[in-house]
Image (cartoon, grey):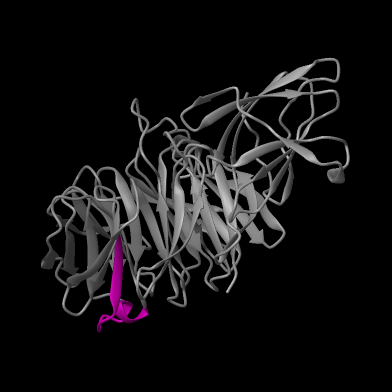
C-alpha cells in the first residue's frame, strides 16, 4: 500500500488505512528520518492521556516494523531531539500500513509549508513570477503549474503542447523570458523546444532544438537568443528565441548540461558532465575562451551571482555529481576558489536572490538495481552560506530530490522529488 500525498504540518492526517475496530493488531512498516526517531502510541483518545514507546519487531535497513493494538483508531507520535514532533492519525479498514515519514529540524531558515502531488517524474522547477511555479514532467504529458503561499500550494492546471508531442513525454528543463512573457521548455524525446504564454498558460509554438536530447535552456535578457545544451550531440545550439532558427552549433569538449550567462550576455559558462570541466565560450563567436579542468568529474549545474552576471568579477557556483561536491569559481580569474563535499549524486543548485544562501539538492545513493528505483535513504536539501559554503541547515527530502527553484523575492523554495511525484514547498524565514 502506498502513502498518499499530504500537507506537512505538526499534526497530519495521513489518509492511509489502519485496522478496523474488530481487528486486534495493525502492522506498521515505517521508514523515518532521522532513522532513530522514537515511535509511540497514544494510550487514550485524548492527547493528554500519555503514550507508550513502541519497540520494533524487526528491522530491514532503515525500515522498522511495529505491531500496534487497535481497540480504537491509533494515534502515533514520532519524536527525535532537534526535530519537530509529528502526530500521525491512522484510520480505515486495512491491517497493514507502509509509510515514509520525515521529521523537520527545529532550526534553520527553511520550514515546510506544503507537500502536494505532481505529474510523473518532476524533473525541474522554475518560478515565472513571485508565486507561480512551473514543473516539467519527464514521464508525463507536459508541465504542471502551481500557485504558492504560506497556506500551501494550489495546482492550477496541466499545460501541454499538442498531442503529438505530449504523448512522447520527456519534458526536462524550463527557461522564462520576462521580456517576452514566454516559457520555454525542452523535450528531449522529440528534440524540440515548446513555448507557452506565461499569462494564460496557453501553448504558442514548437521548434527544433538544434541537436539531440536537449537539456538546459538559457536566454539573453532581451529574449532574442536562446542557448540549449544537448546531451547526445555534445553541442550547444544557439537559436533565435522568436523563430527557433538555428544560429550556430557550438561543439563542447564533452557532454554538456548546466549553463550560465554573464549579465551582458558575452560569456556562456558550461558544465561538461562527461569530464567534470567547466568551459567558457564567447557568445559573439561561439569559440571556447577558457576551460577549468576538473576531470574526472560530472559537473551538472552552474549559477552565477549578481557580480558574475555583470561579467566583471563575482562568483559562480557549480555542482558535481561524481564527487558529490559544490564549488565556487572566481569569475575574473576563472579559478576554483573552494569546494565542499556534501553527499551522493548532487543535482540542482539555486542561489538566493539576495546572495545569502546556496540551496543544493542531493539525490542520494542509488538503488543497486537501478537509479530509477528508490535508494537506501531519502535524499537531502542543503542550505549553505553563499559567501563561505558553511552548512546552515540539512533537511531530508523524499526519494531523489532533484528540481529546485527559489522565488524572485527569496520567500519560498520549491523542491521536487523525482521518484515520488512530489512537490515540497519551504518558506524561507530570514
| In the displayed structure image, the side of residue 174 where residue 115 appears, left or right | right
Q: Residue at x 48, y 37 (%)?
A: 419
Q: Is residue 316 magenta?
A: yes
| In the displayed structure image, the side of residue 39 where residue 293 appears, left or right | left
| In the displayed structure image, the side of residue 343 where residue 5 appears, left or right | right
Q: Residue at x 71, y 51 (%)?
A: 10
Q: Is 151 in front, or is 212?
A: 151
Q: Is 64 in front, or is 341?
A: 64
Q: Quadrant of residue 82?
A: bottom right
105 up-or-down from 34: above or below: below
Q: Quadrant of residue 100?
A: top right
- Decide if residue 263 is in sight here: no
- The magenta-colored residue range is 306-318
100 up-or-down from 60: above or below: below
Q: Is residue 376 magenta?
A: no
Quadrant containing the C terminus is bottom right
How far across and how far down the image is residue 126, in percent? 48, 59
How far across and how far down the image is residue 271, in percent? 24, 58
136 up-or-down from 132: above or below: above
How far across and how far down the image is residue 321, in percent? 28, 49
Q: Is 43 in front, or is 2?
A: 43
250 up-or-down from 70: above or below: below
How far across and how far down the image is residue 211, in percent? 24, 47
Q: Residue at x 15, y 58 (%)?
A: 294
Q: Residue at x 26, y 80 (%)?
A: 311
Amino acid at each position: 500500500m502506498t502513502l498518499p500525498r499530504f500537507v506537512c504540518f505538526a499534526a497530519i492526517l495521513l489518509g492511509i488505512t489502519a485496522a478496523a475496530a474488530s481487528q486486534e493488531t495493525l502492522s506498521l512498516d515505517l521508514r523515518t528520518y532521522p532513522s532513530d526517531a522514537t515511535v509511540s502510541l497514544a494510550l487514550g483518545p485524548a492527547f493528554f492521556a500519555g503514550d507508550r514507546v513502541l519497540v520494533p519487531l524487526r528491522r530491514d535497513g532503515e525500515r522498522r516494523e511495529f505491531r500496534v493494538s487497535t481497540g480504537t483508531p491509533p494515534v502515533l507520535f514520532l519524536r527525535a531531539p532537534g526535530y519537530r514532533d509529528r502526530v500521525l492519525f491512522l484510520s480505515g479498514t486495512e491491517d497493514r500500513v507502509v509509510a515514509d515519514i520525515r521529521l523537520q529540524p527545529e532550526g534553520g531558515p527553511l520550514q515546510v509549508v506544503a507537500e502536494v502531488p505532481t505529474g510523473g517524474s518532476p524533473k525541474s522547477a522554475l518560478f515565472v513570477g513571485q508565486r507561480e511555479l512551473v514543473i516539467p514532467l519527464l514521464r508525463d504529458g507536459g508541465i504542471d503549474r502551481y500557485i504558492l503561499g504560506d497556506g500551501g500550494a494550489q495546482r492550477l492546471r496541466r499545460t501541454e503542447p499538442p498531442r503529438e508531442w505530449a504523448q512522447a513525454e520527456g519534458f526536462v528543463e524550463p527557461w522564462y523570458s520576462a521580456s517576452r512573457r514566454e516559457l520555454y521548455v525542452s523535450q528531449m524525446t522529440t528534440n524540440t523546444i515548446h513555448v507557452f504564454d506565461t499569462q494564460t498558460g496557453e501553448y504558442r509554438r514548437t521548434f527544433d532544438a538544434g541537436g539531440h536530447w536537449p537539456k538546459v535552456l538559457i536566454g539573453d535578457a532581451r529574449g532574442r537568443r536562446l542557448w540549449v545544451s544537448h546531451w547526445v550531440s555534445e553541442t550547444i545550439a544557439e537559436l533565435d528565441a522568436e523563430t527557433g532558427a538555428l544560429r550556430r552549433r557550438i561543439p563542447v569538449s564533452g557532454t554538456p548540461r548546466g549553463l550560465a550567462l554573464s549579465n551582458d550576455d558575452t560569456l556562456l559558462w558550461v558544465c561538461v558532465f562527461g569530464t567534470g570541466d567547466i568551459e567558457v565560450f564567447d557568445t559573439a563567436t561561439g569559440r571556447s575562451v577558457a576551460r577549468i579542468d576538473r576531470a574526472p568529474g560530472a559537473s551538472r549545474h552552474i549559477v552565477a551571482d549578481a557580480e558574475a552576471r555583470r561579467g566583471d568579477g563575482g562568483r559562480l557556483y557549480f555542482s558535481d555529481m561524481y564527487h558529490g561536491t559544490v564549488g565556487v569559481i572566481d569569475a575574473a580569474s576563472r579559478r576554483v576558489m573552494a569546494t565542499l563535499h556534501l553527499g551522493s549524486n548532487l543535482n540542482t543548485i539555486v542561489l538566493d536572490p539576495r546572495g545569502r544562501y546556496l540551496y543544493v539538492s542531493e539525490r542520494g545513493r542509488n538503488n543497486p538495481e537501478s537509479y530509477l528505483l528508490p535508494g537506501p535513504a531519502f535524499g537531502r536539501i542543503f542550505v549553505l552560506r553563499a559567501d563561505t559554503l558553511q552548512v546552515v541547515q540539512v533537511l531530508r527530502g523524499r526519494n531523489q530530490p532533484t528540481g529546485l527553484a527559489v522565488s524572485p523575492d527569496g520567500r519560498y523554495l520549491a523542491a521536487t522529488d523525482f521518484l515520488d511525484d512530489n512537490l515540497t514547498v519551504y518558506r524561507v524565514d530570514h
